[in-house]
Image (tube, rainbow, N blue to C red):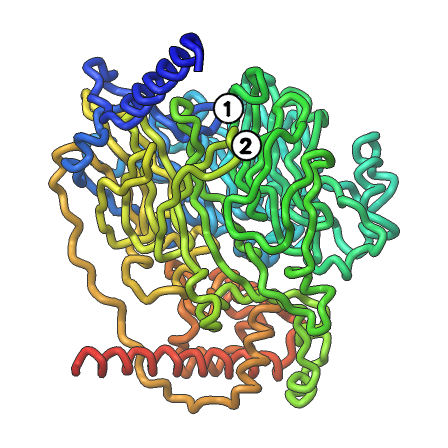
């Protein structure tokens, strides 16, 4: 080795060692923290990075972090949105589109707003009324969406309505569950159709000051040819195949992921999948079915199409592209590029050029068995036969990830100093089946097509039901390097469904869990540095601000019933911490507050009705899933709480009224939609299923009691 080469090698070693010291050294608290700061946009900045440079709480001080105060929030359906802070007030939305304003120093409730909601409409709107993922702030306004299709702006100081507009159509099977996004003087909102494809997906833009409608971008074309009046819509229609839009109105709702880019003046939209899920039930010659399961960029001023990238062409697994869209500037491939990043529901992490949508990086961040990789030349997945339930002889397959996704709507965070994205990951092996129970349905007097037929059913609890997959059911916090295209570290959680993340200048990453823990990790190494146990599931992403010179962390907790996946979390564990009351939690260094002791959940009484035959109960389970009862009432009929009753606890009186409730609409004013096409035999089968689930809960309770007594 010559002298020059030797010098270069030594210099490289020294630089590497120094870089390691810098990366691993604890960050000292800043001496010039702002006295008071705000977090007035989802994600903390326009790019939705969920990062704060505040460093008073760091690796050296986090051990002194404690609860400063808590505020009970009167939202029975939980809290899951990212808390927003402006001028010393914390703003939060909950189920039923209620808005709450709390004093950041004490937690005192200053005001609340509760809109009058319409429960007389369709099933989707009734469901959507209970699910709310957050709100937006624009100047003197707090803006929230409602399940019955309205966007409402209230005064930040008083909670009085300033304007209210209709976005989606409450007469159609659609509603609003996502948080509005703001930028460039406008507020953006998409619709939801509950993955059912009963309405076209779209995004609306309104003037943030007045509520005046500015533009609408349809994420799917119309099934009526004459309505596809733009070149973009005509091009999209051609990808649905022969008569492809006649069997469905398209689906493709934009139910959550919207990110406004002030640098490029673009709005990035994450789009849901096509319906029905089974691709064999859609046009056989269909192409990508634009713009479903795609990330779309439109001009923020006009809504004009700019580019799109399809993540899962001709989707068969409900792999929505509606997950968090994070914008950043990366030095990649020899130059600085503005990029859009997404950890997809389908298990792949994507890095796209924000200007033109070009795919720059893609790799799986979780276990995937539906595709081997993403072809970087074509940008398309290379599919595998393992997960193609619609092609197999028995029409079933265990899918990784399942329809709940390897990453759902829970926020990622990005630390530009370390070049890492922190992803809430869920590993949920799911049995996907085309349901068909002709023998059982015929014996029960139920038409075959009503018992399932060509409908897709999925068992999210398959990891519990089949011991082979039990150790593959868990959650993770993953630190992902978007340039190197791989993970840097992983931290395991017991439950798969956990909260959004926050990265800070204190070299920390914070995340809450489905079983009520609030955790802090070293952002470089993944070492857990702090743990606080609460009494409610945490699905929200945390917020951090300064108050009178002290750094505070804010996070929402509760039963999380306003997040649909919480019914699944409740079914995974009997831990009381998944179903706590709705609370806003505030932490700071030296905090000493404690939560009150909770009363245990009421015991399951011995059911008064005898068990039904397994075959009848199984048919009831199929009908329970087919008619979407599971969406609100939970997997295995286990409720997450809130305003949704636990059907395993039905009284004999209510049980006797099942037909009047389910078919006749007796409880419609309370938000229970009727299903008038159901027969008495079908309702009876569902009743049998619920009765057997009640017995299962009772037996498990007694088994545990006997075990403890030994």
Name the residue at the front extreme.
1
Q: In this view, does 29 lie to the left or right of 299?
A: left
At x 39% / y 49%, what residue is drawn?
Answer: 498
Quadrant of the image containing the N terminus? top left
Q: Residue at x 69, y 74 (%)?
A: 394
Query: In the rendered image, which quarter contains the C terminus?
Result: bottom left
The quadrant in which residue 6 appears is top left
> Which residue lies at the image location 14% right of the left edge and 47% below the top edge?
594
Label 1 and label 2: CA atoms lie apart by: 8 Å
Pinpoint residue 613: horizontal percent, then vertical percent.
52, 90
Mark 1 touches mark 2? (CB < 8 Å): yes
Expressed as whole percent of the image width and height from the top left, the position of residue 682 reads 61, 80
Q: Where is residue 585 in the image (x, y as percent from the top left)?
A: 25, 41
Relative height, residue 85 to residue 606 (above, below): above
The reply to whether residue 94 is in sight is yes
Whether residue 88 appears in this view of the structure is no
Q: In this view, does 279 lie above or below 679?
A: above
Q: Mark 1 points at which residue?
A: 328
The quarter of the displayed image where residue 111 is located: top left
- Residue 249 screen position, x and y as percent: 75, 50
- Taking 250 as reference, is 467 left or right? left
**228 on left or right of 319:** right
**110 or 591: which is nearer to us?**
591
Left or right for 465, reference 589: right
The vertical placement of 468 against 39, above or below, is: below
Residue that carries the numbered disc 2 in the rendered image: 341
Q: Is mark 1 on a helix, strand or loop?
A: strand
Looking at the image, the residue that sits furthest to the top is: 4
Is the residue marked by circle 2 packed among few (<14), some (14-19), or many (20+) residues within 10 Å? many
Q: Which of 666 and 20 is in front in this view?
A: 20
């Amino acid at each position: 080795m010559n002298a020059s080469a030797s010098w270069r090698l030594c210099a490289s070693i020294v630089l590497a060692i120094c870089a390691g010291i810098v990366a691993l050294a604890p960050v000292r608290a800043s001496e010039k923290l702002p006295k008071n700061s705000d977090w007035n946009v989802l994600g903390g900045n326009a790019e939705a990075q969920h990062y704060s440079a505040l460093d008073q709480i760091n690796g050296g001080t986090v051990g002194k972090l404690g609860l400063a105060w808590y505020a009970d929030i009167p939202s029975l359906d939980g809290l899951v949105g990212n808390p927003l802070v402006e001028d010393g007030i914390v703003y939060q939305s909950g189920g039923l589109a209620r808005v709450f304003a709390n004093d950041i120093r004490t937690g005192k409730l200053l005001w609340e707003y509760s809109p009058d909601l319409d429960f007389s409409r369709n099933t989707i709107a009734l469901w959507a009324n209970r699910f709310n993922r957050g709100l937006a702030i624009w100047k003197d306004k707090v803006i929230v969406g409602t399940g019955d299709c309205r966007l409402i702006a209230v005064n930040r100081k008083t909670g009085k309505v300033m304007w209210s507009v209709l976005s989606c159509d409450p007469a159609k099977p659609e509603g609003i569950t996502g948080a509005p996004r703001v930028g460039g003087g406008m507020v953006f909102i998409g619709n939801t159709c509950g993955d059912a494809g009963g309405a076209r997906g779209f995004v609306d833009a309104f003037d943030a000051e007045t509520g005046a409608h500015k533009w609408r971008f349809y994420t799917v074309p119309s099934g009526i040819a004459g309505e596809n009046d733009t070149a973009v819509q005509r091009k999209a229609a051609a990808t649905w195949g022969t008569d492809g839009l006649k069997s469905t109105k398209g689906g493709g709702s934009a139910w959550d992921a919207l990110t406004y880019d002030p640098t490029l003046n673009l709005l990035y939209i994450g789009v849901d999948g096509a319906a029905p899920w089974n691709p064999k039930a859609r046009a056989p010659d269909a192409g990508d079915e634009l713009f479903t399961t795609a990330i779309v960029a439109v001009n923020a001023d006009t809504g004009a199409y700019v580019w799109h990238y399809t993540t899962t062409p001709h989707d068969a697994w409900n792999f929505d592209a509606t997950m968090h869209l994070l914008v950043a500037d990366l030095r990649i491939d020899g130059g600085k590029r503005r990029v859009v990043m997404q950890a997809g529901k389908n298990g792949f992490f994507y890095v796209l050029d924000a200007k033109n949508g070009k795919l720059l990086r893609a790799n799986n961040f979780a276990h995937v068995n539906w595709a081997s990789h993403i072809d970087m030349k074509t940008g398309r997945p290379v599919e595998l036969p393992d997960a193609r339930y619609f092609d197999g002889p028995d029409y079933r397959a265990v899918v990784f990830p399942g329809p709940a996704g390897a990453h759902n709507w829970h926020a990622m965070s990005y630390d530009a100093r370390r070049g890492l994205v922190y992803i809430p990951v869920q590993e949920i092996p799911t049995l996907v089946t085309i349901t068909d129970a002709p023998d059982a349905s015929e014996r029960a007097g139920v038409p075959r097509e009503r018992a399932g037929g060509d409908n897709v059913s999925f068992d999210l609890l398959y990891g519990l039901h089949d011991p082979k997959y039990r150790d593959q059911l868990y959650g993770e916090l993953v630190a992902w390097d978007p340039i190197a295209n791989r993970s840097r570290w992983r931290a395991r959680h017991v439950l798969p469904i956990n909260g959004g993340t926050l990265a800070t200048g204190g070299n920390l990453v914070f995340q809450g869990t489905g079983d009520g823990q609030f955790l802090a990790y070293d952002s470089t190494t993944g070492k857990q540095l702090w743990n606080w146990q609460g009494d409610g599931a945490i699905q929200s992403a945390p917020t951090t601000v300064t108050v009178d010179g002290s750094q505070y962390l804010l996070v929402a907790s509760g039963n999380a019933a306003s997040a649909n996946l919480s019914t699944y979390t409740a079914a995974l564990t009997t831990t009381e911490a998944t179903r706590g009351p709705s609370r806003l939690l505030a932490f700071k260094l030296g905090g000493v507050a404690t939560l009150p002791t909770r009363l245990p959940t009421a015991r399951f009484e011995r059911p008064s009705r005898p068990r039904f035959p397994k075959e009848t109960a199984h048919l009831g389970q199929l009908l329970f899933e087919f008619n979407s009862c599971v969406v609100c009432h939970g997997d295995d009929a286990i409720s997450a709480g809130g305003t949704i009753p636990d059907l395993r606890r039905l009284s004999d009186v209510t049980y006797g009224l099942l037909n009047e409730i389910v078919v006749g609409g007796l409880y419609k004013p309370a938000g229970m939609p009727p299903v008038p096409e159901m027969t008495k035999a079908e309702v009876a089968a569902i009743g049998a299923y619920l009765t057997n689930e009640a017995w299962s809960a009772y037996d498990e309770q007694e088994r545990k009691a006997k075990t403890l007594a030994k």
